Image (cartoon, helix red, strand yellow):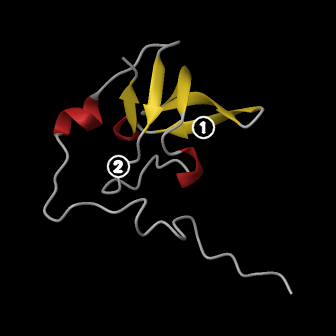
Amino acid sequence: MVQKYKGFRAKTRKKLAQKPRYRPAITKFLQEFDLGQKVVISIEPSSHSGLPHPIFKGKVGEVVGKRGRCYLVEVLDGKKLKKVIVAPEHLKPLK
């Protein structure tokens, strides 16, 4: 028998946990990125819009486009190049 799918945030209790009474800065939601800029996907658990799949947590990618408020990021997943749509609050610029 096939196992039942348990949802998008399944098995992420520790991975997407947040400190009590933590509020992200508003500038995190308003940050902008240039095309070709390298970014790190760091998931912000308090915001559910534009949330990438937890598989991509901590991956480094390159911004290749913009879709409305979100960014199109190319990430290397194993040997495959994947495009992920991510909101700016879930991204950090790579220094």
Q: Residue 45's x, y, as percent?
A: 35, 56
Real-space CA distance between mark 2 and mark 1, rounded to the nearest whole angstrom:
16 Å
How far from the left and from the top, in percent, is residue 82? 70, 34
Sequence-wise first label, 2 or 1: 2
Which numbered marker is on residue 84? 1
* Placement of 10 over or under 76, stated as above or below: below
- Count the marks: how many? 2
Mark 2 crowd level (few <14, some 14–19, many ≥20, 10 Å Cα) = many
Q: Residue furthest bottom?
A: 1
Would you place residue 66 above or below residue 95 in this image?
A: below
Q: Position of residue 5 (x, y in %)?
A: 68, 75
Amino acid at the residue labelled 1: Val
Towards the viewer: 16 or 23:
16
Label 2, on which residue? Answer: 44
- Residue at the spot 78% in from the left edge and 32% down from the top edge: 79
In this view, which residue lies farthest toward the left?
Answer: 21
Q: Is residue 47 left or right of 65 when viewed as pictured?
A: left
| Numbered circle sitting on residue 19 | none
Disc 1 element: strand
- The residue under the point 43% across, 59% down is 15
The C terminus: image quadrant: top left
Asked whether, in this view, residue 92 is left or right of residue 3, the answer is: left
The amino acid on which the numbered mark 2 sits, given as a three-letter code, is Glu
Is disc 2 in contact with disc 1, using a CB cutoff of under 8 Å? no
Residue occupying image coordinates x 21% and y 61%: 19
User: Against 48, is 71 above or below?
Assistant: above
Q: Secondary structure at mark 2?
A: loop
Q: Is residue 71 left or right of residue 47?
A: right
Among the 4 quarters of the image, the one containing residue 88 = top left
Which residue is pictured at 46% across the width and 46% down the height? 50
Instruction: For residue 65, say whether it is visible.
Output: no
